[in-house]
Image: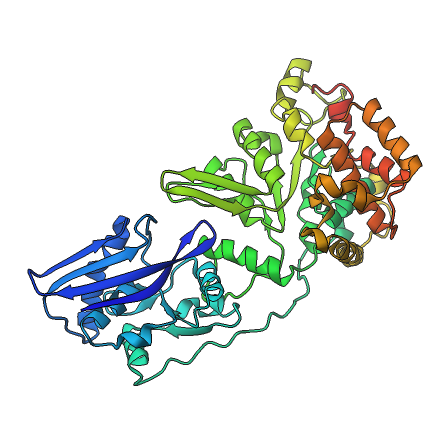
Amino acid sequence: MYSKVLSGTLHGVDGRLITVEADVSEGLPVFNMVGFLASEVREASDRVRTALRNSGFQIPPKRITINLSPADVRKEGSVFDLPICVALMAAYGYIPSEVLDDVLIIGELSLNGDVRGVRGILPIVDYARKMDIQRVILPYGNRKEAAVIPNIEILPAKHLSQVIDHLLGTKEIVPEQMKESVSKESTCNVDFAEIRGQNTMKRATEIAVAGMHNILYLGPPGAGKSMIAKRIPSIMPELSYEESIELTKIYSVNGMLDSESGLIQKRPFRSPHHSITANALIGGGQNPKPGEISLAHHGVLFLDEFLEFPKNIIEMMRQPLEDRQVTISRLQGSYTFPCNIMLVAAMNPCPCGYYPDMSKCKCTSPQIERYLRKLSEPMLDRMDMSISVPKLKYDELYGETKEESSEDIRKRIVLAHAVQKRRLHQYDVLFNSQIPVNILDKVCQLGNEEKELRKEVFQKYNLTARGAAKILRVARTIADLSHSEKVKCNHIWEALSYRMSDVFHKGGGL
């Protein structure tokens, strides 16, 4: 007899449907599996037979053929154990074939019949909903993750016998109810009020977060670069529902959601060490997975000690920062991972860290130049803002001043995000840093005086086309924070000041 069951697999961070076909016929007892299978999928034959026997189901020895189609898609992982088992039971006639219509089945089986959780459930269930599949039978441990997808029935199972009983109609599985996303206030245990001085740096950071602009901090050790960067999560707004779905898919694919996880509702803040490999940062591997740059999607990727990262890794980030996605090509196909991030980088201006303070800096000019050349002009051009961070003075550090709290800053950023969302919604972008070049002039609305200033700035500072566009985007964000519908000259001047770092533009080596 012949039967088939729908299942699913991953391709990058997207789901894809797989049809599991089973045929049982007379002949020499054998269990054949075909369909471009990885080794862990081929091992399913032993897990399925043992799980059936230990669950009290006996299958007569016959010629069994299992096909996973389409045949040109490589199948990996242990997600096909449960659908193979169900298709086999239907082929033997133990389960009516008609009950398998409009149901997708996915899950790993242990030898005693327990249904184990798998990674990547969320994108598979989301794709199943788009394909008008009505029900999904999946592991109990993945129920919270899958239940965030609306308009599809989620049936969580702990054991193989539960699945068989449900399909036979003897004891139905209780569907998991979709949980409404409840917005929670940020509970960061750090605050901008703890930072003394560095008002210019705080202002630049507020602008960067308000428009999701890339920002580079340059300054001596102990100036507060890392301290401010680590407080960025305390001023970031919550994710929208659409952003949460996209981000949760990435964490689901990487197996980074626990059994009680639903939607991720806070913007991620990823801070990898400079010893990280290229595959871990950008993504890749034999079976490509998202890297840190994708795990920071819709959030912040903080690279401390920026120039301690290998030069090749720094340069590899140029294309993802520009395209906001990573495409990895392998023999079995191409994989695309989103990485719409705000890059925050912190670095010292020289190997010892004290340039241009020559009373402390012990580096020679060739050493400083060689050190700074690790950051190429094309990479530097992709940073929207570049801030020189001075050493703190005594009065700034110990003076009786009241610093602004993260909550006060966050309120202004939330308002700026709302303005951008209303303005840019029709263009399918969310933040000023993402404004396409072809609509930049329309969105920024420059007057004659501002256009003359733009021309003067472009010629005087020998800007690239990318650099000029980034200054205008930052100026748009400054205008939004100032509640100005149009970009004014003072907004452009301030945006320009955040791009003219002393180290790189006053004899530092580039």
Q: Nearer the viewer, residue 307 or 173?
A: 173
Q: Nearer the viewer, residue 449 or 203?
A: 449
Q: Is residue 203 visible?
A: no
Q: Quadrant of residue 301?
A: top right
Q: Is residue 114 visible?
A: yes
> Which residue does the image show at 84% across and 41% down from the upper left?
396
Q: Quadrant of residue 339?
A: top right
- Residue 250 appears at what percent x and percent y? 50, 53
- Residue 37 appears at what percent x and percent y? 27, 50
Of all residues, the one furthest to the bottom in this rendering is 170
Check the image and report above or below for 448 versus 72.
Answer: above
- Residue 289 appears at what percent x and percent y? 44, 46
Is 162 positioned to the left or the right of 471 in the image? Answer: left
- Residue 170 appears at what percent x and percent y? 30, 85
Check the image and report above or below for 103 versus 274.
Answer: below
> Which residue does the image show at 54% across and 39% down from the upper left?
273
How many labels were placed on the picture? Answer: 0
User: Which quadrant of the rendered structure holds the C terminus?
Assistant: top right
User: Which quadrant of the rendered structure holds the N terminus?
Assistant: bottom left
Of all residues, the one furthest to the left in this rendering is 28
Is 15 positioned to the left or the right of 191 in the image? Answer: left
Check the image and report above or below for 189 versus 175.
Answer: above
Is 153 positioned to the left or the right of 243 in the image? Answer: left
Check the image and report above or below for 71 versus 167.
Answer: above
> Which residue does the image show at 66% across and 41% down from the upper left?
344
Q: Quadrant of residue 165?
A: bottom left
